[in-house]
Image (cartoon, grey):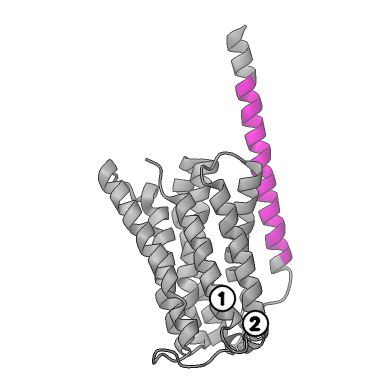
Amino acid sequence: MVPAIVSIGMAVTVEAQRVRLAILILALSAFAVLLFSRPAIPQDVAYHHMADTRRAFGVTNGLNVLSNVPFALVGVFGVIGVARRCAWEGEHDPRRRGPHFVLFGGMALTAIGSGYYHLAPDNARLLWDRLPMACVCAGLVVVVLAECVSARAARRLFLPILASAVASVGYWRWSELHGAGDLRPYAFVQYGSLLVIALILALFAGRHRGERYLIAGLLAYGVAKAFEMADAFVFAITRHAVSGHTIKHLIAAAGLACIAAATQPRA
């Protein structure tokens, strides 16, 4: 009697897992169809025009550059935490901790890439801003996938997801250089990652120990994007004290700190 009940319970669990995965795949596929069915999206040159172009502490576009420092702090502490955990466990499998290093290393490199871009914003420099952020997206998706869905699947998908993320930025830059700019692949990586993570947290609720921190990080990202779009407006209402873009960096860094707290590897 008991073995039969256990067998039925396992069958129901497996079927439920398949339904959740089907929903996840269908939602991501629908997003891809909607995105790639529209014409190519070139980079708007107005994106490079920041409201606050003042020098600060001798740095051109000072506050927009220096507000990237928190990204470095979060990333470095994250990398140190993962390295210590690996040393303590004697872990040498790059497929297991690799996503964590990519996630936190990408955060640290975002400070460098974004700082470099904001010194003299243009498409050439934007490449180095977007590359580390694409790596952050890839690392985060794989880490959440491993904890909430399947560690085995996450290990297998790690390199393909990372390569696709990097390629999306490379393709965008290549397309701009050839006069046919197309941001769609990069948009798929960035917003598709957010969609996947949000759906995993909803469909596999309770499986991630840092679920609340992840949700806070995603919400912070949304707020940061809102401040980015209100760059000039915020600069005006604060009487040129601070721009929306600078605040965007600080809120985004706080969001990444929440994500870092949620995704430190388990003991």
Q: Secondary structure at mark 1?
A: helix
* Pointers 2 and 1 in contact (C-beta within 8 Å): yes
Q: Is residue 119 above or below residue 163?
A: below
Cα separation, mark 2 vs mark 1, equals: 9 Å
Quadrant of the frame with the N terminus: top right
User: Is residue 31 magenta-colored?
Assistant: yes
* Residue 108 position within the rendered picture, expressed as x and y whole percent measured from the top left: 39, 68
Instruction: Give the main secondary structure, helix, strand or loop, of the magenta stretch.
Output: helix
Q: Residue at x 67, y 43 (%)?
A: 22
Quadrant of the frame with the C terminus: top left
Residue type at the position of mark 1: Ile
Q: Which disc number belongs to residue 234? A: 2
Query: Depth check: 34 or 85 in front?
Result: 85
Q: Is residue 129 above or below residue 263?
A: below
Q: Residue at x 43, y 80 (%)?
A: 66
Q: Which residue is mark 1?
A: 247
Residue 88 figure quarter = top left
- The tag earlier along the polypeptide, 2 or 1, is 2
In the visual, does 1 lie left or right of 177? Answer: right
Residue type at the position of mark 2: Val
In the visual, does 157 lie left or right of 48? Answer: left
Characterize the local packing of mark 2: few (<14), some (14-19) or many (20 or more) Cα atoms within 10 angstroms. Answer: many
Q: Which disc number belongs to residue 52? A: none
Q: What span is in magenta? A: 9-34
Q: Is residue 42 above or below residue 161?
A: below
**Quick check: can you spot residue 92?**
no
**Quick check: can you spot residue 118?**
yes
* Residue 157 position within the rendered picture, expressed as x and y whole percent measured from the top left: 49, 51
* Residue 190 position within the rendered picture, expressed as x and y whole percent measured from the top left: 58, 65
